[in-house]
Amino acid sequence: MNQHVKNVTAETTDLSRRSFLVGTAATGLVLGYAGVPGVSEALAAPSNFEPSVWYSISPEGLVTVTCGKADMGQHIASTMAQIVCEELGAKWSDMRVQLASNDPKFNDPVLGAQITGGSWSTMMNFDAMSRAGAAGRIALTEAAAAAMGLPPFYKDELVVRDSVISHPKSKKQMTFADIVKSGKATKTFTADDLKAIKLKTPDQYTMIGVSVPQLDIPSKTNGTAKYGIDVMLPGMAYGKVVTPPVRFGATVKSVDDSDAKKVPGFIKAVIVDDKTQTTSGWVVAVANTYAQARKAADALKIAYDGGPNAKLSSQSLLDEAKRLQGLDDSGQYFVKDGDPNAAFGSAAKVLEAEYTTNINIHAPMEPMNATAEFKGDILHIYSGNQFATRSGAIAAGAAGIDPKFVVMHQMWLGGGFGRRLDADMMVPAVQAAKAVGKPVKVIYSRENDMTMDFSRPLTYQKVKAGVDGDGKIAAISHDVVSAWPTARWGIPDFLTPSVDQKGPLDSFTVNGSDFFYTVPNHYVRAIKNEMAHNATPSGQLRSVAPGWTFWAVESMIDEIAAATGKDPAQLRISLLDGAGKNDGGAQRLRNTLLAAMGLAGYGTKKLPKGEGMGVACVSSQERATASWTACVAHVAVAPSGAVTVKKLTVATDVGTQVHPDNIRAQVEGAALWGLSLALYEKATLKDGGIEQTNFDSYTPLRMSQMPEVAVAVIANGEKATGVGEPAVTVVAPAIGNAIFNASGARVRALPITAEAVKANMKA
C-alpha cells in the first residue's frame, strides 16, 4: 500500500479536525517553514555544494546526508548515507548524517510524506537516493574536467573513488574538497534528468553490501547525539501529565490545585483542551523542574466524567468482535476470489477455528516527550517522531495556529516501533507552553506511557477452510475484527477501497491475509470493531496487521496439514506454486522456507519427547511491498504446559542488502520481538483503562528467556526489501505450530500460556 503514502492529500487550513491530520507540501499545510522568514536560509551554508536536497558537500570535502526518516536505532540515517556514498564515490570517513526538519523542501514528490514505518524506508528510498548520489558524481566529474582543463568528452575517462576524481592518462586529480572550493560544480538536474541516469549494477557495487561503521554510533556513545528527552532551552519549564483512569472519552470536571501550590516551583495546572481529538481528559502540572512537576501532579485533585467507555473491558471488546463477525452484512471485503461458500458445500472436509490476540503496548525505552516553544508567531517543537507530515499538523491544531507557522526539530528516537507515528506528546507540551508563556518540556512517566499508549488492538479472527477429496485446499474464508488504527488518522489516502465497493477499509488491519498461497476460493472480510476503536485508540505496533493475520493464516495451514496427514512444510511448498497473481512472489517465499528448513535441520533429526519444530512462511508486509520471511521454531513443552523456545531459525530474502551486519541485527531483534509478543506480552482493559502500568505487570521477553537465533539472509540483487518488521510476523505461528508437534496442543490465542497449552495437550 505504499502508493497511499505518496498521495496524502491537502485540505484547507481552517481549524477543523481534518486540517490537523492531513496535508502536503503543496500547500505548506503541515510543513512549518512556508512563509517563515530566515528559517530555510539559515539551514545551509552558501559555500556548500548541494547536488540534492538530501545532501551537501562542504569545502572541506565532508558529505552530509540529510535523512528524512526517523532514526530509532535501526541506523536508517547511515543506510541513506551508504546508498548515496555508493553512487557518489565518496570516502566513507567523509560521510556525515543529520535528521531532516519539516521544511517543505524535504517533502519530496518521489519519496512522499515524511513517514517511517512499514519497513518502507530502504525499499522506497533506495532508487531516489542512488540517483541523488549519481547526480552529484556527474556534476563533480564535469566540474573536475573543466577545472583540470580537459575537453568535455574526456570526462568519461575520469575515475571517481574515495572522494577523489582522477584522470589516469594525464595523472591529474582533484579531491571533492578542491572541486567544491573551485566553485565550478554548478550542474543541476531535472526530474527527467535524474530518471535518465544509468545507475550501477550490483556487480559494480563497492559500498552496498559492506558492513561499514554506522555513522551515528560515535555520537550516541559519547553523548553528543540529542534525543527528545535531552532538549534544554533557556527559561524552560517542565510539564508532567496527569492522565485519566479511562483510556479515551473522559473529561475533566474540576481541578483542585490547592495542595499543588504548596510544592516549590509549581507554576500552573493546565487542562488540555484538545480539538484534534488526540487526547482526552488530560491535565498538565507545570513547574520549574521535572521533579517539582511530578510532585505537583501527584498533589492535584482532579474530578472526571469517565465518559462512554468507562465500564468497558477486554471481554467487552471481544464479545463485541464476535457479535460483529456473526453478522452477514458487517465489514467490507479485502479479498473476494471465487466462491468459498459453494466450495465449502462440496468439500470433503471443513475446518473452522477462532484466533485471538490481546492488546499490546510499544513501551520504548525513551518515554514519550516533547518540548514546545513559541517565538513570536512561530511554534517550535522539539521531539523525535516517525510522521513529521502529520505531527506538525497536530501540533498546530493543539496551538490553534496555521500549520505553516510550526517548525519541527527532529531528534534521535530512543525507540519507536510505531509508537512515535502518533504525536500525542506534542499536545500537552504545546498547550502548556501557550498557557505559561515559556518553553515547556513534557515527559511522560512510564505509567503515562503504558496506560495511554496507542496500542496494538485486541483482535478476533474466524477462519474457515475447505479441503477437497484429494486433500487440496479448495477454499478459505477469513474474517478479521479489530479497531482500525490507520482509519483513526483521518487520512483518506491511507485507506483502501473495498472490493465489494462498500466503502474504504483499513487495509493495514488485514494485510497478510491476502497471502501468496494458491487457493482458488478465498474471501477476507475486514470488520471494524467500533467499540474497541473508541475505547482503545490503536496505533501501528511493529509489524502491524501481519502480526495477527499471519498468526491465523499460518496456524490454519498447519491445522489443515494435520487434518489431511501432510507435512506442514511440504503443504506450504505445494501451495507456493506461483499461479496467477502469485507469480514471482510465491517462488521467493518458497525459497526462504527451504533455506530456513535447511539451516534448522527440519525433518532431518529425531527430537526428544516433548520437543518439536514448527514452520511458518510469510510475505511480511503489504503484497506491493512484500518481504519474504520464513521461520523454523524449535520448542520444548513441559508436562505443565510451560514452553521453552530453544531456537529460532529465520531466513529472509532482502533483495539487495545494503549493510549485512545491520540486516542480521534487525532480523534478530524482530524475531525476539515476535517471541515476546507470542509468549509474554499482554495488556488488559478494565473499567475503560489499561491495567498494566509498568514492566512488573507488562512483561516483555527477559534476557534469561533468550533462545538461540540463527539467521539466513538471501541477497539476490532484486529490489531492496524491508527488514525491520518482517521477522516479527513469522515467529508466533512457528512457535504455535512447534508446540503442536511437541505436545499435540493446538493453541489459538496470543500470548500463548502454559495453562492453554496444558488444557489442549493430547492425553
Image (cartoon, grey):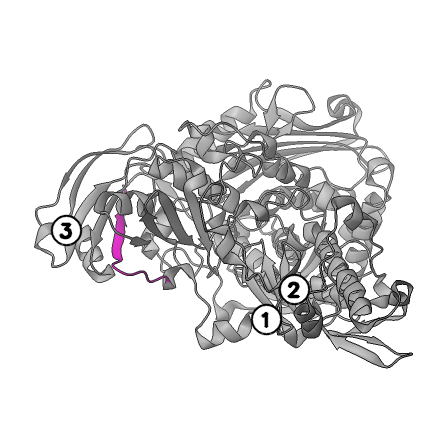
Percent of width and height locating residue 452: 37, 45
Q: Residues within 10 Å of mark 1 (few under 14, many from 20)?
A: some
Q: In terms of image quadrants, where is residue 424?
A: top left
Quadrant of image for the N terminus: top right
Residue 212 sits inside the magenta stretch: no
Residue hosting label 3:
299
Q: Where does the magenta region start and end? A: 231-243
* Nearer-N-terminus badge (1/3): 1
Q: Please say if the residues under marks 1 and 2 sit with CB atoms less than 8 Å apart.
A: yes
Q: Residues within 10 Å of mark 3 (few under 14, many from 20)?
A: some
Residue pushed farthest front? 149
Marks 1 and 3, how far apart at CA = 45 Å
Marks 3 and 2, how far apart at CA = 49 Å
Residue hosting label 1:
215
Depth check, front residue: 657 or 32 = 32
Depth check, front residue: 608 or 371 = 371
Q: Residues within 10 Å of mark 2 (few under 14, many from 20)?
A: many
Residue hosting label 2:
81
Quick check: 750 above or below 636?
above
Q: Residue at x 54, y 36 (%)?
A: 486
Q: Which element type, helix, strand or loop, lies under badge 3?
A: helix
